[in-house]
């Protein structure tokens, strides 16, 4: 275990799993968790506070579907001169829509996710980042098909690296969600802004967020329920600090899958427990890999075991394993905030909003 996670007992680990997998959306969620785990509410909040202090738990908040909210987004692969990569990463990380930014062991050595708000031109934002970072090559890799999205780190350590699980409803694409015109009320936007912040450790935490949203507690909870039903909110859950939580290895396994087999093998690959994200993405002459699987393990060997299990289950032989060498940024996209206006004013002279 990494420092911080090693002091946790079995109850801590069960609680951290519950925070990631099945957080109750009710007026007194910590009391509800305590009832489920045989703890008093004060002990639940104390254990959560300890996990935050140890750097194991990053945040407890709503997790929204970026594209369903009307934001355009893509994974981006960049090739940067190795001696300039830190400088390039700093330029890219300063964009408010860049939530993840990693150095990886490949000729495409800088990988980041970029999102831009509704009405903005994605290509304009990406061109600024490409130019200002000094990247030699920049390849946008938007999601063509989503098979799974959802990081769940089993803190008990009981899930084998080659285990398979059922993909939960909130981890799968919602058919038709993105095809309908998006309509958000003022209350919807206020609730999204409030609940993307960390949930406070109080008896009625949603009442605190409701005050920030300018509504009542019941209205906030009902709005969250509707946002979830509409596929705009994936879930309300904890986000862990992988390394501090003991999951030291982070690998992106990318695969060459014949188009005739993608619809068959994509869901199969998504069904491995250690795979947190599974997508089909476009290819380029210098990038032949069309299926991406993000894998988290307690060790590099765990990740390799998962890759071997996927290879054996699918028969795929053409793949590459890209390791996270350095983390420059890892956060949540913040929706409907003023950060974008400042970035546009500085970097897009004519404005990118249409």
Image (tube, rainbow, N blue to C red):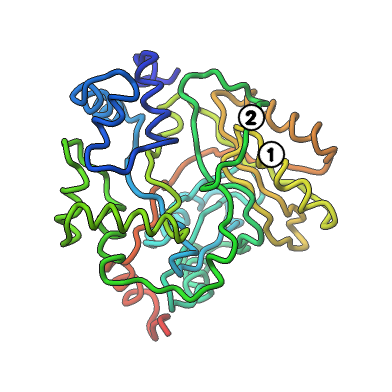
Residue of label 1 = 321
Residue 240 has which mark? Answer: none
For marks 2 and 1, give the one nearer the viewer.
Answer: 2
Residue in the image at 30% along x and 55% along y: 222
Residue in the image at 45% along x and 32% along y: 242
Q: Is residue 20 visible?
A: yes
How many callouts does the rendering have? 2
The answer to which of 45 and 90 lies nearer the viewer is 45
The answer to which of 279 and 210 lies nearer the viewer is 210
Residue in the image at 28% along x and 25% along y: 34
Is 165 located above or below residue 294 in the figure? above
Q: Is residue 136 visible?
A: no
Q: Could you tell me which quadrant the N terminus lies in?
A: top left
Q: Position of residue 154 (x, y in %)?
A: 50, 26
Residue in the image at 42% along x and 26% along y: 245
Q: Position of residue 103 (x, y in %)?
A: 54, 45
Residue 303 has which mark? Answer: 2
Q: Are marks 2 and 1 in contact (CB under 8 Å)?
A: yes
The answer to which of 89 and 40 lies nearer the viewer is 40
């Amino acid at each position: 275990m990494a420092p911080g996670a090693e002091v946790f007992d079995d109850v801590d680990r069960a609680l951290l799993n519950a925070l990631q997998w099945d957080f109750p959306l009710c007026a007194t969620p910590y009391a509800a968790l305590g009832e489920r785990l045989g703890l008093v509410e004060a002990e639940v909040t104390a254990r959560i506070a300890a996990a935050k202090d140890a750097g194991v738990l990053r945040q407890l908040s709503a997790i929204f579907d970026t594209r369903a909210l009307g934001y355009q987004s893509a994974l981006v692969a960049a090739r940067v001169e190795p001696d300039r990569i830190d400088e390039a990463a700093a330029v890219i990380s300063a964009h408010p829509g860049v939530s993840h930014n990693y150095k990886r062991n490949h000729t495409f050595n800088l990988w980041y996710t970029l999102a831009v708000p509704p009405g903005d031109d994605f290509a304009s934002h990406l061109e600024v980042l490409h130019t200002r970072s000094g990247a030699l090559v920049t390849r946008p890799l938007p999601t063509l098909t989503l098979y799974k999205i959802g990081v769940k780190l089993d803190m008990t350590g009981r899930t084998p690296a080659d285990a398979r699980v059922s993909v939960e409803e909130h981890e799968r694409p919602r058919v038709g969600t993105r095809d309908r015109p998006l309509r958000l009320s003022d209350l919807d936007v206020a609730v999204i802004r409030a609940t993307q912040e960390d949930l406070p450790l109080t008896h009625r935490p949603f009442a605190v967020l409701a005050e920030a949203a300018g509504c009542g507690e019941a209205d906030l909870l009902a709005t969250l329920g509707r946002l979830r039903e509409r596929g705009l909110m994936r879930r309300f859950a904890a986000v862990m600090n992988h390394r501090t939580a003991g999951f030291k290895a982070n690998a992106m396994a990318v695969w060459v899958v014949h188009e005739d087999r993608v619809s068959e093998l994509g869901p199969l690959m998504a069904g491995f427990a250690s795979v947190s994200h599974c997508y089909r993405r476009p290819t380029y002459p210098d990038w032949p890999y069309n299926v991406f699987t993000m894998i988290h393990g307690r060790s590099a060997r765990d990740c390799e075991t998962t890759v071997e299990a996927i290879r054996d289950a699918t028969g795929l032989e053409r793949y590459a394993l890209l390791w996270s060498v350095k983390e420059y940024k890892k956060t949540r996209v913040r929706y409907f905030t003023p950060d974008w206006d400042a970035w546009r004013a500085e970097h897009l002279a004519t404005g990118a909003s249409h």
